Image (tube, rainbow, N blue to C red):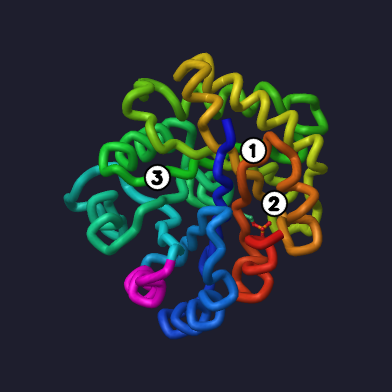
Amino acid sequence: MARKKLMAANWKMYKTPDQARDFFHNFLPLVAGHGRDEIVVCPPFVDIRASVESSKNSSVSIGGQNLYWEKEGAYTGEISATMLVATGCTHVIIGHSERREYFGETDDTVNLKLKAALEADLTPIVCVGEVLEEREAGLTEDVLRRQCVRAFHAVSTKKAGKLVIAYEPVWAIGTGKTATPRMAADAHRLIRGEAAKTFGEEFANSMRILYGGSVKPENAKALMSEGEIDGALVGGASLDPKSFAAVVKY
Ligand code: PGA
C-alpha cells in the first residue's frame, strides 16, 4: 500500500512570531500546488498562532513540539493536547531525543503523552532512536524495541489511528552525519515489526515511519527513494524556506 510521505519541520527553539510569518510568506509560494507529500511545520508554542494564521488557505499543517498529558491543572509551564488543538495544531512531536536528554522525558512519559495526543485526535509523531554508544555496542535493535514497546503500551489499534513514528538516530541529529538509506531502512523495518506485534500487520503496513537526522536538500532524494522511509523530520534545514522547500520537493 502506498503511504503518502510526511515532510515535517522541527524548528526547535528558533524563530519569533514575526520570523515565523516571514518564513511562511517565503515558503508557501515555493510549495504551492505540491500535493505529493503532506507538509507539517512544528514551531515553538509562541509561534503557533502566527504560523496557523500565515498558513491558512494552504495545505501546510501546524504541529506542537511537545505537550503535557493532563487536560488542565496546576502544571506551570505546560501545554495540553486540548490547547494545541484549540490553537489550530493538528500534529505534535513526542519524545524527541532532546526532550529525553535535557528535560527528563522517559519511555513512560512518552507513552502518557502519546495517549493524550491520540485522545485529542492529534497526529502524534513519536521519536525513537539510539545514541552513538548504543549503536557501537550493537544495542540499536534492543533500544528501538524497548522504546516502541513502552511507547505503545496500552494503546489499542483502534485508538492508534494516526500514529506516526520518527526514527532519529541521536548521533545523526544536528551533526551533519546521516544514517545511510540502508541503515534507516533496517531500523524502520524493525520498528514496523514492533508496530505489527502491537497493532497488527495491516495497521503497521499503513503506519508512516519518518527518518530524521541531518536531512537536507542534498540527501533528501536518496533517503526518500528508500521504500521504507515515509517522510522526514527536519531540524536545521527546515529553518530556511528555500532549503525546507527543496527537501519537501526532493
Ligand atoms: P536535524 O534535526 O535535521 O537538525 O539533524 C532533526 C531533529 O532533531 O528532528
Instruction: Report the amino acid beneath label 1.
Output: Gly
> 10 Å neighbourhood of mark 2: few (<14), some, or many (≥20)?
many
From the image, tell me which residue sits under label 2: 213
Q: Residue at x 50, y 84 (%)?
A: 22
Q: Between residues 71 and 18, which one lies in front from this camera angle? A: 18
Q: Residue at x 30, y 62 (%)?
A: 88
For the residues bearing labels 1 and 3, Cβ distance under 8 angstroms: no
The disc placed on residue 123 is 3
Q: Quadrant of residue 78?
A: bottom left
Q: Quadrant of the C terminus?
A: bottom right
> Which of the two marks, 3 or 2, is nearer to us in this view?
3
**In 3D space, how far apart are the residues under numbered discs 1 and 3 (Cα atoms)?**
19 Å
Look at the image and say whether residue 48 sits in the magenta stretch. yes
Q: Residue at x 61, y 47 (%)?
A: 231
Q: Position of residue 125 (x, y in %)?
A: 48, 44
Does 86 appear above or below 206?
Answer: below
Q: Between residues 124 and 16, which one lies in front from this camera angle? A: 124
Instruction: Report the amino acid beneath label 3.
Output: Thr
Q: Position of residue 38 (x, y in %)?
A: 51, 54
In screen coordinates, is 172 left or right of 146?
Answer: right
From the image, tell me which residue sits under label 1: 129
For the residues bearing labels 1 and 2, Cβ distance under 8 angstroms: yes
Q: Which residues are magenta?
A: 46-58
Q: Residue at x 61, y 66 (%)?
A: 238
Q: Position of residue 8 (x, y in %)?
A: 55, 56
